[in-house]
Amino acid sequence: MLFFLRERGQGMAEYGMILVLVAVVVVIALTAMGPLVRNLFSSVNASL
């Protein structure tokens, strides 16, 4: 019984690490592409 509880906790920890990794990748991507997206929205706004 205790063996199954340990595996469940380990799986949750792995999902947590994957979630943190995805969040870091998203932040890095948004930081890198931020100026490009801002310029795109500015040009669309100016053309309207």
Image (tube, rainbow, N blue to C red):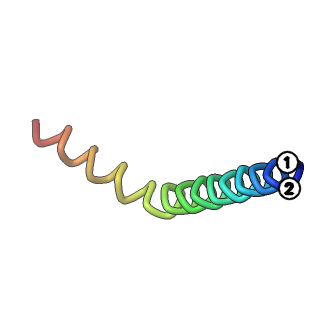
User: Mark 2 — residue?
Assistant: 3
In which quadrant of the rendered image does the C terminus lie? top left
Q: In the drawing, does residue 23 fall left or right of residue 47?
A: right
Identify which residue is drawn at 62% across, 53% down.
19
Question: Answer yes or no: do the residues labelled 2 and 1 have beta carbons within 8 Å?
Answer: yes
Kind of residue indicated by mark 2: Phe
Identify which residue is drawn at 82% across, 47% down.
5
Dot 2 falls on a residue whose secondary structure is helix
The residue most toward the left is 48
Give percent across and percent down for residue 39. Answer: 32, 53
Using the image, determine if residue 48 lies above or below residue 24: above
In the foreground, 37 or 45: 37
Kind of residue indicated by mark 1: Met
Q: In the drawing, does residue 25 fall left or right of residue 12?
A: left
Dot 1 falls on a residue whose secondary structure is loop
Identify which residue is drawn at 72% across, 50% down.
12
User: Mark 1 — residue?
Assistant: 1
Total marks in image: 2
Q: How crowded is mark 1: few (under 14 residues within 10 Å), some or many (20 or more)?
A: few
